Image (cartoon, grey):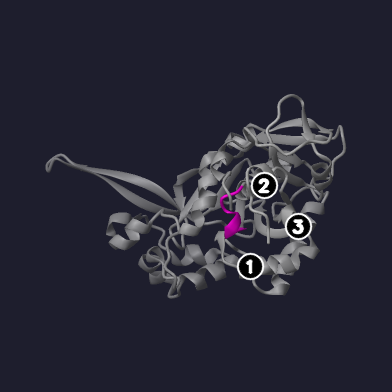
Amino acid sequence: MNAPATEANQAGRYLLRPAQAGDLPGLLRLASQRAIGISSLPLQRDALRERIESSALAFASDDAPSGDETYLFVLEDRAAAGELIGTAGIAAAAGFHDRFYAYRNEFVVQASTALGARNRIHTLHLCHDLTGVTLLTGFHIQVDHAHTLAPQLLSRGRLMFIAAHPERFSERIAAENPGIADDSGRCPFWDAVGRRFFGMDTAAAEALAGGRTHKNWIAELLPQSPIYVPLLPEEAQWSLGQLHPVGELPFGILMDEGFDGDNYVNVFDGGPTADSRVALLKTVAGRRRVRASLRRVESAVSTGWQLVARPGREDFRATVLPRGTGRSVVLGEDEALALGVAAGEWLDVAPLEAAAAADGPA
């Protein structure tokens, strides 16, 4: 049985790294489990193997990035012999093979002097504003680690990688979040809008959009004129921009980072698509480069936490350690081994102020 994640034993417990071929069984297990987040893991072994191989090529490539790269990360619980407990990804450029579509929230003001009436009306505009921006994808973590530092590392650790390799990514970043749907997959927003033009359920449309097929069919079938939200059924209006419960944890982390969740919604389920400038995000703005210092250290209750990352590509590693001061970060022998660093090597660190809410037991 795994040890509970108390405040004292979370230092260095979790390790974020690039997915490898040997992670296939662990990722298949994660794909089949109930989890928190936006799981995009295929259940088919061959499809998942292809995703791992594509990611490995992206991490390994020394060539100038094309924008087609996808990066898949896994999260280990080192207190459980390296068991995989989570995964998340990055797409270097959204809509690389075609446009990336979303609905942009806008408001139209109409007034009648004769009637003394003035209305501010919410409208949705089909757009591809986010084409080419970097996209955070597939946050997925085991439920029993949701109230630990693990989800903080899984989400924000990707930002440490982006900050260390800005030439591989856009200056803008976005993340889709799941909208309201019931247990059967019925989605009020899709039923009110998309189904009327596509004649298929949400799952079928999202599966089609998730493939390598061109996305022109979205623009070809969805209305080009604005959608006036007050004309939609009340259930669809209420669900617009609302989160499915499984998305609350990763969305909360994004909001704390400085993402804006009010500008766009997903064309399928109406969930919020958050966006920001990379440079404005809390982790990126607070990142600094320091030297690694090695000595034996005893576990202690922390007064604060920090992300600590080895800023490589294939050898990228990140964990969470008690916050330090000065121009070095002190690592125990085990932590240095996990990160793959020696004394004097460079590390990236960033404060993790929001982690206090996650310090309780799992």
Q: Check disc 2 and give the amino acid type.
A: Arg
From the viewer's perspective, is the residue at label 2 or at label 1 nearer? 1
From the viewer's perspective, is the residue at label 2 or at label 3 nearer? 3
Number of the label disc, if any, that sits on residue 82: 3
Q: Identify residue for label 1.
A: 31
Q: Quadrant of the N terminus?
A: bottom right
Q: Nearer the viewer, residue 233 or 289?
A: 289
| Residue 32, horizontal then vertical, whole percent | 62, 70
Mark 3 and mark 1: Cα distance apart in space: 17 Å
Q: Check disc 1 and give the amino acid type.
A: Ala
Residue 13 visible? The answer is yes
Mark 2 and mark 1: Cα distance apart in space: 20 Å
Residue 361 colored magenta? Answer: no
Q: Identify residue for label 2.
A: 158
Q: Nearer the viewer, residue 187 or 223?
A: 187
Q: Check disc 3 and give the amino acid type.
A: Gly
Residue 232 visible? The answer is no
Mark 2 and mark 3: Cα distance apart in space: 19 Å
**Residue at left offset 64%, top offset 51%:** 93
- What crowding class fits label 1: few (fewer than 14 Cα within 10 Å), some (14-19), or many (20 or more)? many
